[in-house]
Image: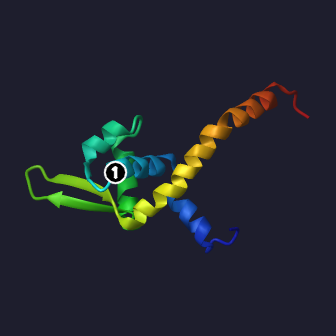
């Protein structure tokens, strides 16, 4: 994992953001259907238009998300997870379960560290 060419490190560099995991989760909930950009943005609280756009571009480039454009005015753009993207949802779901289970413990540890005098 310490080697820059390590597949794990390369993957974490690509999918290690909160926005990526949220986009994958929302698209997985819609699978096998598609969602338009505006609907994705509505379902992901706090994400800016720019950050959603950058995240989707990255996911499309990596082959995790498929993008379909309808030739209307303005163009209607639809997104869905590919098979590869769907296979990522399981590991991300496991990470969410781990976080929900252990974040209180991590928060408690942080509070104790903040209350302790510096060594």
Asked where in the image residue 96 lies, by quadrant, the reply is: top right
User: Left or right: 99 with respect to 41?
Assistant: right
**Residue 75: where, in percent of width, then height?**
14, 53
Report whether residue 52 is seen. Answer: yes
Q: How many marks?
A: 1
Residue appearing at x 72%, y 35% in the figure: 105
Q: Residue furthest top?
A: 115
Q: Position of residue 38 (x, y in %)?
A: 26, 42
- Pinpoint residue 31: horizontal percent, then vertical percent: 32, 54
| Quadrant where the N terminus is found in the figure | bottom right
Quarter of the C terminus within the rendering: top right
Residue farthest along the left direction in this orientation: 73
- Residue shown at 38%/52% (left/top)? 28
Outermost residue on the bottom side: it is 5
In the displayed structure, does residue 49 sit left or right of residue 11?
Answer: left
Q: Classify residue 66 by image quadrant.
A: bottom left
Q: In the structure shown, which secondary structural element does the residue marked by tag 1 occupy?
A: helix
Location of residue 113 in the rendering, given as x and y in whole percent from the top left corner: 80, 32
By what rule are the colours in the image chosen?
A: rainbow
In the picture of the structure, the residue carrying the numbered disc 1 is: 53
Image vertical order of residue 68 relative to residue 48, above or below: below
Residue at image position (64%, 39%) is 101
Can see residue 16? no
Q: Would you call the spot at circle 1 few (<14 residues within 10 Å), some (14-19), or many (20 or more)? A: some
Query: In this rendering, would 31 be left or right of 69?
Result: right
Front position in the image: 54 or 97: 97
Could you tell me which residue is drawn at 37 percent across and 66 percent down?
A: 83
């Amino acid at each position: 994992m310490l080697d820059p060419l390590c597949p794990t490190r390369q993957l974490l560099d690509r999918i290690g953001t909160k926005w990526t995991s949220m986009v994958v989760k929302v698209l997985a909930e819609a699978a096998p259907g598609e969602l338009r950009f505006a609907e994705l943005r509505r379902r992901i609280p706090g994400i800016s238009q720019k950050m959603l756009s950058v995240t989707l571009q990255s996911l499309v480039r990596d082959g995790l998300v498929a993008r379909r454009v309808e030739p209307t005015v303005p163009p209607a753009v639809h997104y869905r997870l590919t098979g590869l993207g769907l296979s990522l949802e399981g590991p991300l779901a496991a990470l969410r379960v781990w976080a929900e289970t252990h974040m209180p413990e991590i928060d408690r540890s942080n509070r104790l560290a903040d209350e302790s005098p510096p060594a």
